[in-house]
Amino acid sequence: MADAFSPDLLTIILLGAGTAALIIVLVSVRKFFQFAPYAYPNARVMARKGKLLDRKQITEIIDAKEMEETYNLVEEVPDYKKYMDKFPFEKAMDMQLAETHELIANISPKMFKEFFEVLFSRWDIKNIKTIIVAKEMGVGLEEIKDATIPFGRLKKDVLDRLINSENIEEIAEVLKGTEYYGIIEDTIPLYKEKKIILPLEASLDKYYFDRWLETVSNISNRDVEVLNSLVSIQIDIINLKIILRSRIDDLEFKDIEDYLISGGRQLSPWKLKDLLGAEKIGDIVSMLEGTDYVDLLRDNISEYEKTGSVSALEFALDRYAMELGGMLSKRRPSTIGPILDFLTKKETEIKNLKVILRAKQEGFPPKIMRKMLLGGLK
């Protein structure tokens, strides 16, 4: 009878153990190289997240009796103070957000370089839209300067010339040689015909999100899941805003179909076409049955009916996008998720500070302000 542990059997056991150990090592090494690019940026992001305003600080800002006290409480945050010393409140907030985007772009893995370049173009588009709206409303040069943010891909001299433009034709002329020229030029005829700026704004948004989708498709599979979810939510929100405003501006499907963005999360092209055929805002809300957006809009439609403005509906959609964006970003802690989660939280904080300031200027009580915040404050 052979020994219980013969040399051959011992060799097999040792080889098996060695193979198992090698597999464990290889898996560990693979995971290390997968997660290593995120270690430094995620550590930096966690440190920055610790500087975000907490519930107690936001409550103190809401409960401040005087406007000066409100400013002082925000100025206690060093990141905001350096801009509040130089700019009006809202511009100071946007400058800090733009600086945050720049910082995150600089510390993020190189594979996301193109993604953040697209994110920077968001500031160009925001500035172009702001200038177009301001010119349409007859706003003065100083006010336009205060409303524009000198971040993005457009050079400072181009931004200055845009601010000093007299009309949409001059704005298009200044943008010659940039990626935005064709977008504005192609939309001018409809703008002149309808005398509304929605097509101009929608065409810029479509360009931005089309580029964003193209960029996301070039990123690793592990990150695509997070990015695609975030982008597709934003696309649904933008499309719904365009559709809501198209009803207010009495635009037809043929006027606006080219500016709707494909790649949404819950609203397919045929669904968007149906929504554009609705005659009233209430009809649009009813047609969203079965989507995450129906209750959001239904809960706020009474405000639209009282004021005739869709801003309450748009705000509800923005709140949803922010909250869901933060939740989705947390699902992948070893990818770009924490970075996007921080950016979402930072943007939410800044939007909430703007909401609080405007609400105080309008004389809203603290109880109402709490309900107006993105993310809420119970």
Image (spheres, helix red, strand yellow):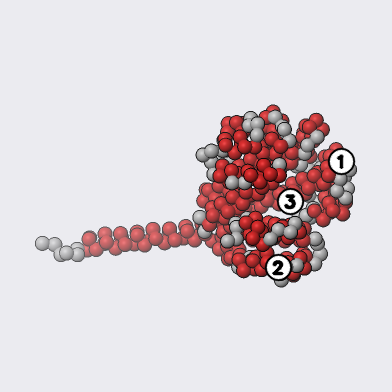
Residue at image coords 54%, 53%: 328
Q: Which mark is first along the chain, 2 or 3?
A: 2
- Label 1 to label 3: alpha-carbon separation: 21 Å
132 vs 277, left or right, is right
Pointer 1: what residue?
Answer: 167
Callout 1 secondary element: loop
Mark 1 and mark 3 residues within 8 Å of each other at the beta carbon: no
Which kind of residue does numbered mark 2 sit on?
Answer: Ala
Residue displayed at 66% across by 68% down: 60
- The quarter of the displayed image where residue 2 is located: bottom left
Q: Nearer the viewer, residue 341 or 139?
A: 139
Picture quarter containing residue 262? top right
Using a 10 Å C-alpha cutoff, classify the residue at mark 1 as few (fewer than 14 neighbours), some (14 to 19) or many (20 or more): few
The span from disc 3 to disc 2 (Cα, nearest Å) is: 31 Å
Question: Which sits earlier in the primary sequence, circle 1 or circle 2?
Answer: 2
Does residue 209 appear to the left or right of 71 in the view shown? left
* Mark 2 closeness class: few <14, some 14–19, many ≥20 residues within 10 Å: some
Secondary element type, mark 2: loop
Type of residue at label 3?
A: Trp
Is residue 101 in view from this perspective?
no
Is any part of residue 308 visible from this angle? Answer: yes
Q: Quadrant of the N terminus?
A: bottom left
Q: Which residue is mark 3?
A: 123
Numbered circle sitting on residue 112: none
Percent of width and height locating residue 242: 68, 39
First reached walking from the N terminus: tag 1 or tag 3 = 3
Between tags 1 and 2, which lies in front?
2
The residue beneath circle 2 is 64
Image quadrant occupied by the C terminus: bottom right
Residue 66 appears left or right of 13: right
Image point (30%, 59%), residue name: 16
Q: Position of residue 63 (x, y in %)?
A: 68, 66
